Image (cartoon, rainbow, N blue to C red):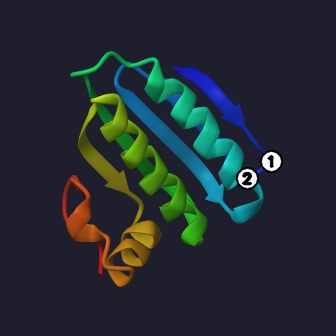
Amino acid sequence: MSVLLEQRRSCLEAEGCRLAVTGEVGFEGASAMAEAGTAWLVDRPAGSEVVFDLSGVGRVSSAALSVLLEWTRQARDAGVEVTAVHLSAPLGRLTRVAGLDTLLPLAGPVAA
């Protein structure tokens, strides 16, 4: 697994077709995380598949959703298919409340 970004409270790693976030995603680090993930995404060949794994995200804010949506947009623009999105329970709840759960290829049910 390659570490793409390590911040005080979060880490972004890539392995194969998987982009994984662990820790806390807040506004103070969201921009750097979005940029690091985007840099990884643009290196993916068009037609390839990716999985976004945010199941290791603990305390969340809407910043995590912003990062996820930016990566989804960047993948679409690069011709890369997002085949699955794994969310932690707190992030799943926030995604559902925001009405974004129907827009993402969520892997498994979002916790209530």
Q: Is residue 74 left or right of residue 4?
A: left
Q: Nearer the viewer, residue 23 or 101?
A: 101
The kind of residue on which mark 1 rests is: Arg
The residue where tag 2 is placed is 29
- For mark 1, does the 10 Å Cα neighbourhood hold few (<14), some (14 to 19), or many (20 or more) residues? few
| The image quarter in which residue 36 lies | top right
The residue where tag 1 is placed is 8
Residue 78 location in percent, x, y?
35, 30
Residue depicted at x 38% and y 72%: 95
**Quadrant containing the C terminus in the rendered view:** bottom left
Residue 45 location in percent, x, y?
32, 15
Q: Nearer the viewer, residue 25 or 55?
A: 25
Q: Is residue 31 left or right of residue 81?
A: right
For numbered disc 2, what is the local secondary structure?
Answer: helix
The answer to whether the residue labelled 2 contacts the one labelled 1, judged by CB atoms less than 8 Å apart, is yes
Residue depicted at x 48% and y 63%: 65
The kind of residue on which mark 2 rests is: Gly
Residue 32, above or below 98: above
Residue 48 location in percent, x, y?
25, 22
- Discs 2/1, front: 2
Residue 88 location in percent, x, y?
42, 61
- For mark 2, does the 10 Å Cα neighbourhood hold few (<14), some (14 to 19), or many (20 or more) residues? some
Real-space CA distance between mark 2 and mark 1, rounded to the nearest whole angstrom: 9 Å
